[in-house]
Image: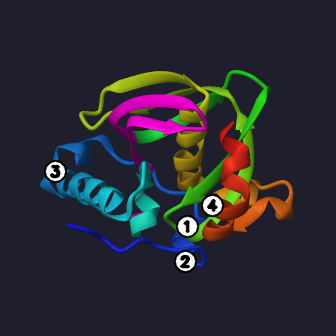
């Protein structure tokens, strides 16, 4: 079922979410939630979605990038469920990308983030997993997992001049950032 996306201004997007209990993972309700999140992400054209974006107060996010090309970087990352994730920053080197968000429709903003991270999390079966990511994938992971701490990408924009409406981004900025 496609669920409506909570937009900036909705208080659920600004709170630290609750941990998911392991016994919940085996329930029909959890399976339905994962299906709804995936359906919603695809319907709205996202590459990731976090539970608070559909009004759910849990540390849960989905990310899927299949043959995705952005900023000259080809990324393929299968649908992955992140439960109770923790990020460890492996470098202080930053990279910047123009980010957008389902919860902040119509805008793009330039955000710099650490370019190499490690994420520890449970998968949908409650098994502990670990991933080391860098480049655009590291940015996507940080963006989605920020939602679980009540942070939106607009909070991380250092220069307000680097916030743009989507149409103006496409007309005036996008071509210059692809190279």
Which label sits in the foreground, 3 or 2? 2
**What is the number of the mark on residue 27?**
3
Residue 115 located left or right of residue 7: right
Kindly report the distance in space between the C-alpha atoms of the residues bearing marks 1 and 3: 25 Å
Residue found 73% across the figure and 52% down from its top: 110
| Marks 1 and 3 close (CB-CB < 8 Å) | no
Residue 128 located left or right of residue 88: left
Image coordinates for residue 3, horizontal then vertical, percent: 30, 71
Kindly report the distance in space between the C-alpha atoms of the residues bearing marks 1 and 4: 27 Å
Which label sits in the foreground, 3 or 4? 4
Is residue 137 one of those drawn in magenta? Answer: no
**What is the number of the mark on residue 13?**
1
- Badge 2: few (under 14), some or many (20 or more) residues near its Cα, within 10 Å? few
- Secondary structure of the residue carrying tag 3 is loop
- Badge 4: few (under 14), some or many (20 or more) residues near its Cα, within 10 Å? few
Residue picked out by circle 2: 10
Which label sits in the foreground, 1 or 4? 4
Which label sits in the foreground, 2 or 4? 4
Residue picked out by circle 4: 170
Q: Which picture quadrant has residue 80?
A: top left
Mark 1 vs mark 3: which is more N-terminal?
Answer: 1
């Amino acid at each position: 079922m496609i669920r409506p996306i909570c937009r900036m201004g909705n208080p659920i997007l600004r709170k630290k979410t609750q941990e998911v209990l392991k016994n919940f993972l085996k329930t029909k309700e959890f399976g339905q939630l994962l299906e709804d999140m995936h359906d919603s992400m695809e319907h709205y054209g996202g590459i990731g979605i976090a539970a608070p974006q559909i009004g759910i107060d849990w540390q849960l996010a989905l990310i899927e990038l299949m043959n995705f090309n952005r900023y000259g970087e080809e990324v393929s990352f299968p649908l992955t469920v992140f439960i109770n994730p923790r990020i460890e920053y492996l470098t202080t080197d930053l990279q910047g990308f123009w980010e957008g968000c389902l919860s902040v429709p119509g805008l793009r903003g330039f955000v710099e983030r650490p370019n190499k991270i490690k994420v520890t999390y449970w998968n949908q079966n409650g098994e502990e997993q670990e991933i080391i990511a860098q480049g655009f994938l590291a940015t996507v992971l940080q963006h989605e997992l920020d939602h679980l701490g009540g942070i939106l990408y607009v909070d991380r924009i250092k220069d307000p001049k680097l916030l743009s409406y989507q149409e103006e981004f496409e007309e005036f900025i996008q071509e210059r950032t692809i190279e």
